[in-house]
Amino acid sequence: MLVVGEKINASRKKIAQAIEEKDAYFIQKEARAQVEAGADHIDVNAAPFMEKEGEYLQWLVRIVQEAVNKPLCIDTPNPNAAVAALKLHKGKAMINSITGEKESISSFLPLLKEVGCSVVALCQDDMGIPLTLEDKVRVASRVIEDLVGEGIDLNNIYIDPLVQPISTDSESVAIALDTIEEIMSRYPGVHTICGVSNVSFGLPLRRQINQTFIVLAMQRGLDAAIVDPFDRQLMANILTTRTLLGNDEYCLNYIDAYRRGKI
Amino acid sequence: MLVVGEKINASRKKIAQAIEEKDAYFIQKEARAQVEAGADHIDVNAAPFMEKEGEYLQWLVRIVQEAVNKPLCIDTPNPNAAVAALKLHKGKAMINSITGEKESISSFLPLLKEVGCSVVALCQDDMGIPLTLEDKVRVASRVIEDLVGEGIDLNNIYIDPLVQPISTDSESVAIALDTIEEIMSRYPGVHTICGVSNVSFGLPLRRQINQTFIVLAMQRGLDAAIVDPFDRQLMANILTTRTLLGNDEYCLNYIDAYRRGKI
């Protein structure tokens, strides 16, 4: 399970302020704390700054990788901003995200082919966000096949089923979970990823929803998630689910996490 | 999801003492608190008292049903004790438990046929407790078919796959989960039940393990569990899983539980 830490996102007021003030200390502290909490990748997002996004994203890549030895998840819908950020990135980056929309694929393809980074592909096309299992699988399959047809390695593709909030439709999560299982079994080697917090939008005790969702999704094959790594219960649930599903021989990781005070 | 509250069990020292002293107040308080916490059935167990078990079990049935308007789960391996307790029970009781051992089935059959109670059937036969998926499904299937062949309604049978502690074998939980799914799909109408706390035996932070296991098991079809209803996080996870799996229209149960301070 790949844990992408979501905290360095300019939609958060404190982060936006730190970016504008070029407060490297604050950003680096946030990056280190996420790694300490268990993040494998660090998401960096400066999208709200519009025309300054590219410049800020480059700054973020540089100073975050100064602080932590982890790959970044370069979070932008803008291929130009992505290209510039990728040039500074050390190691294998993840681009977050493309969609199945024609323009999105064609504008990102050159850099995906050149750099060999991994990419989050949202389950969305020119018709919008599909809501049924059948449509979600169809859109995801087309994106996967388009990318693979262009020479992108299946292992570099992370499909996000775009789970809709359970508050808007009581079937939405079941559909996303079925989509995850279907995609993972139909394309062995591909990955699935979710922005977990969307599930709980509009409900009280959102963390309780997110913490339960991640367990359900991992059982269906989800192998990456964009989460708040400071949510200790969520991180404990990821670890425990891994153990219970048989991926932790002698429970060594579980016991080690307990001894280190992580759970 | 049927929640059986496990607290009135004479293997707990305080409960054993209250039973010996015929401290109805203490037992009734424990019963009410479990119902308040969300238990649908109340387990009553006096097995450690051996020759006095029958007498004590009758007393428990009488005083617990005085206090709460819920069916009991009469927890004894002894058919004579079960018969006497059933005579006093109001409503439809659950017997916990029989096994697939020849003697167990034959000694409990007359009362199961006569009373029409439901019954927990452990996945165990004269060869012991099966450990592989294939053996678990084979033993469970035989118990189900034997009982149904004798006229017991499928709806009254609760198969317990006897999940082994994850600390003893990292595959044990995956096997139990597969067993649950296989039994539920092979015999539509049958139920599955787990004594959840066994999963975490031998590990630190046992509740964390139990709380995660219940989410995984519910997704595979588990529809009853013997649990500690005072574990608030576990009860919250049961409720949230129900909501996320699409069984809570408009999230009304979730929101109601939040408003009542249950989660």
Image (cartoon, coloured by chain):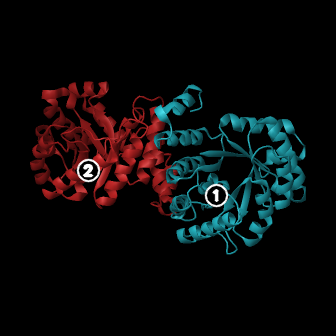
Chain colours: A red, B cyan
* In this rendering, position of residue B33 left or right of residue B218: right
Q: Are marks 2 and 1 on the same chain?
A: no
Q: Residue furthest bottom?
A: B127
* In this rendering, position of residue A27 left or right of residue A210: left
Q: Residue at x 78, y 54 (%)?
A: B115
At mark 1, the secondary structure is: helix
Mark linked to residue A83: none
Give the mark toward the camera: 2 or 1.
1
Where is mark 2, residue-wise? Answer: A138
Q: How many marks?
A: 2
Where is mark 1, residue-wise? Answer: B154
Q: Residues within 10 Å of mark 1 (few under 14, many from 20)?
A: some
Residue in the foreground of this view, choosing between B256 and A6:
B256
Residue A186 drawn at (x, y percent): 30, 59
In the image, residue B133 sits, relative to residue A191, either above or below, namely below
For residue A149, which quarter of the picture?
bottom left
Q: What is the three-letter code of the residue carrying label 1? A: Leu
Image quadrant containing the C terminus of chain B = top right
Q: Residue at x 17, y 53 (%)?
A: A147
Identify the chain of the residue marked 2, using the numbered disc in the image: A
Q: Is residue B17 visible?
A: no
Residue A46 drawn at (x, y percent): 21, 32
Q: Is residue A156 visible?
A: yes
Image quadrant containing the N terminus of chain B = top right
Residue A206 drawn at (x, y percent): 45, 33
